[in-house]
Image (spheres, rainbow, N blue to C red):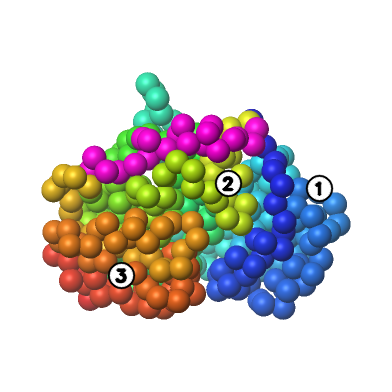
Amino acid sequence: MPYQWKVAPEDLFVERYRQMVNSGLPAEDVDAVRSAIAEMWPDRPGGWVYEWSRLAAGYAERRQHRLAALAYGWAKFPTLADDTKRTALERQLEQYVLAAPGFEAAFERRIVDVPCGEGVTALPVHLLTPRGWSGDTPVLLASGGVDTWKMDSHGLFEMVALRTGMGVLAFDIPGTGECAGPMNSEVGADIVRALAAEARALGNGRVLHLGMSMGGHFSARSGLAGDVDAAIVIGGPVETAFARGRGFAHGMDGIVGNALGFDHEPTPDELAENWPHFVLRPLLDLDTNVPMLVINGADDVHVPQQDTLVFDGRRDTEVHLLADTGHCAVSKMPQVLKLMFEWIGRQPLSAVRG
């Protein structure tokens, strides 16, 4: 079972305010919610899920379904630690589906069977394609991290589909959203391979993988292992981030602990027991990687610079550590997107627009 932990709502606003506004929510609405929230977990006036859900319900009543989905996304943030958070995720999905006819890209919700231990499990994924897409381009697998999931990143994924002409298959990494946990690097790699096979059948047989934050761990893994044809890693932890004794900022310890499947707040030693199989050094020591683009901010408090710089000088690998920006270089996202679209345009993937 998930657990709650001590986290100050204001700390989350300090770190995520730009992300909240850049996602499309009006700044004045975010400011109003910020001033109303005084505590994290209680479902009552002044509580995080209560105030965000109230904003979302107002959008829904006015049939502003896209805004409602965004607000419910922040209501369930940062993890599904209790029933009210799970309810917010359910309502986010309802509003997201209602908003879908207004998307610029065509939308399809699909269920894909993926490995789960000795068996399989049904994983909901979202396919975004340019209108009239005929399947003659590559498909890009796309995922966010431990607290920003496929519906939360819709705007970015839709932009990629429209700008490149590719199909985008968005999914949640293990331990998050609609993907059964706990988070595990090897299980995640199995899921990516299954989704890559699905993507090859949907498009022209070529598959890229875009991962952000913890999702970037999985795109780094698939790119290093050669499980896809090209990989984009934005703010992905690969080695140094998993060193024993490293702490977490802005409540990330509780977010990660929930994703790993703990039912209580883990000690540093309990967390550290999970990290060895996340370390990608065995793959970094090989020369099996596909073309890769690796980007992060130099001031990232979650992922050390070395986890980006370790890719510098690798074959078929382009690395950018951007100054004066933090995790995933969010404050310089236009520059990140420019680098990403230019890099995609240079890849010999057939039928990808420049």
Q: Confirm or deny contact between disc 2 and disc 3 (CB under 8 A).
A: no
Q: What residue sits right under mark 1 in the picture? A: 42
Question: How many angstroms separate mark 3 from mark 1 (CA)?
Answer: 41 Å
Quadrant position of the C terminus in the picture = bottom left
Give the secondary structure at mark 3: strand
Query: Front-most of 235 and 306?
Result: 306
Query: Label 1 is placed on what type of residue?
Result: Pro
Residue 74, above or below 26: above
Question: Image quarter for residue 336?
Answer: bottom left
The numbered disc on residue 253 is 2
Residue placed at 65% from the left, 51% from the top?
76
Query: Which numbered circle lies on residue 198?
Result: none
Relative image position of residue 149 (x, y in whole percent): 51, 53
Q: Mark 2: which amino acid?
A: Asp
Q: Which residues are magenta?
A: 264-283
Report crowding for label 1: few under 14, some 14 to 19, many 20 or more residues within 10 A (C-alpha). Answer: few
In this figure, which residue is indicated by the disc labeled 3? 320
Query: Can see residue 237?
Result: yes
